[in-house]
Image: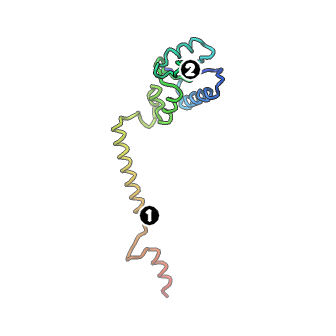
Amino acid sequence: MVIKVFLASSSGSTAIKKKQQDVLGFLEALKVDYAPLDIACNEDNRMWMRENVPVEKKPTNGIPLPPQIFNEESYCGDYETFFDAKEDNAVYAFLGLPPPPGSKKAPVKEEEAQEEAEDEEAKEEEELRQLEEEEAPEVRGGRRRSDRGSRAGRRG
């Protein structure tokens, strides 16, 4: 599966250039195979992109701006949806790719995620309770150990 990123090599918009660089840079950092397809120099690429972006994802003028991202023929999204997936650590799911070997884990169902969060919270509370017990000064006979040492020095 090849990820197709439609971009404009000669865009006059610095915002579009920055968005394109962000997408490409992040895909390179993840070592995702992708094909940059220029819509500025290739009319076929431009027409294919415009025809294959879903109607509900097109702006009001009907012409989608780059970058637009596809997994082969399947539309993944534009910069905003890519950025949201990046923020949610869900880029592989956004791209329709399996997570790489050694990644934390594949996406889990919502119920399982809730259970894991509750288990993790219980573990953290237990660890915190144990740390508090270890750090609490030992009390014997109403005095702390440190108090006994200082009083012993005064007896003469």
Q: Mark 1 falls on what kind of element? A: helix
Q: Which residue is mark 1?
A: 135
- Mark 2 and mark 1 in contact (Cβ < 8 Å)? no
Amino acid marked by disc 1: Glu
Q: Is residue 110 left or right of residue 150?
A: left
The x and y percentages for residue 154 are 50, 84
Q: Which residue is mark 2?
A: 6
The x and y percentages for residue 7 are 59, 21
Q: Nearer the viewer, residue 51 or 126?
A: 51
> Which residue is at a point 55% across and 13% down the rendered structure image?
47
Q: Nearer the viewer, residue 62 or 143?
A: 62
In the image, residue 111 above or below residue 140: above
Q: Is residue 97 left or right of residue 34?
A: left
Q: Nearer the viewer, residue 83 or 147?
A: 83
Amino acid marked by disc 2: Phe
In the image, residue 97 above or below residue 39: below
Question: Whole-Å distance between the Cαs marked 1 and 2?
Answer: 58 Å
Q: Residues within 10 Å of mark 2 (few under 14, many from 20)?
A: many
Q: Tag on residue 13?
A: none
- Number of numbered discs on residues: 2
Mark 1 and mark 2 lie on one chain; the one further toward the N terminus is 2
The x and y percentages for residue 86 are 50, 33
Please say whether residue 3 is visible from this viewpoint.
Answer: no
